[in-house]
Image (cartoon, rainbow, N blue to C red):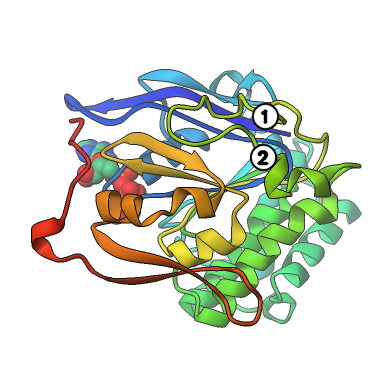
Amino acid sequence: MRIDIEHLSVRIGGAELVADATVRAASGQVVGLVGPNGSGKSTLLRCAYRALRPSAGAVLVDGDDLHALSPREGARRLAALPQESSSEFDFTVGEVVAMGRMPHQSATGRVSAADARACAEALATVGAGHLVDRGFLTLSGGEKQRVLIARALAQQPRVLVLDEPTNHLDIAQQLEVLALLRAAPRATAGPGAADAQRPDAEPGSGPGAEPGSGPGGEAGPTGGLTVLTALHDLNLAAQHCDLLYVIAHGRIVTFGPPHEVLTPTLLAEVFQVRGHQVRHPVSGALQLLFDRLPHQSATTVPATR
Ligand SMILES: Nc1ncnc2c1ncn2[C@@H]1O[C@H](COP(=O)(O)OP(=O)(O)OP(=O)(O)O)[C@@H](O)[C@H]1O
């Protein structure tokens, strides 16, 4: 199932927080949204999981306007992990994860064997099965984050929208969670899903290209978990995302495979750092090294609002 955020704008109190943003994730892709603080990532994602209604544009889930679907149908298709979602639930971990099953339950709210199985699997996936009887409030920040990811997985969505899922996680857990998100599409995808994750099978990309308009752009495989996630850590984004969209001042400035997007020029213009692309000495994966940009040579993306 794909998600297409089409020409989306958000205006609040006279300010345009997001302007004409188009972000597309084909079925089974892991798509990252990166940008500096205050660039509009959370605002865009809040529209993508229905917490905010856009002023213009649309969020399409498999071609249907998400904001026109019933809440139940929307929640069956799409789950979210908001940025500040560590709500103070006075429930056990098992009860918090079971909340993810609500879109699938009858009006009586009776917990079926399928519900129990989905919750147990979700907790096991994030390595938190042992926490099931703990009070949510007693967990560490990282444990809470993993439980909230489990709640989203228990919802068995086809599209997962996450805002900074690695918040509160130590480095091992950051790598674990992102590997998990990458593995999820392969675990649940239909035939051909693995192909869609190859860089050479990704949509047309780069500045000026229409997102999803290139070879393969409309050809995501059927089935599979589609992930759209905001990430601050550009190295994690580079290593775990098929495609990156870069947002600055509420506008998408470029998108494409990480190695094409995270160029020294873009890192200087958008993130105000001097960046170098290197390869991991063992894995060969793209790595970014940063240092401060000399102040006098800093260039900035023109403000759009
Ligand atoms: N309800 C609101 N009213 C007014 N301004 C808002 C509102 N929500 C967000 N903003 C502003 O919109 C801009 C974008 O905010 P947003 O939270 O989307 O950025 P972000 O890219 O997610 O930032 P960060 O990386 O710091 O989390 C910020 O300047 C923020 O102050």
Of the two numbered discs 2 and 1 on the same chain, state the one appearing first in sequence.
Answer: 2
- Above or below 206: residue 92: below
Pick the front one: 99 or 86: 86
- Above or below 178: residue 79: above
Q: Secondary structure at mark 2?
A: loop
| Quadrant in which the C terminus is drawn | top left
Q: Badges 2 and 1: C-beta atoms under 8 Å apart?
A: no
* Amino acid type at image mark 2: Glu
Pick the front one: 273 or 247: 273
Q: CA distance from mark 2 to mark 1?
A: 7 Å
Residue 149 pos. (x, y %): 61, 61
Which residue is identified by label 2? 202
Q: Quadrant of ligand 1?
A: top left
* Residue 217 numbered mark, or none: 1
Residue drawn 68% across and 48% down?
A: 199
Q: Is residue 229 left or right of residue 100?
A: left
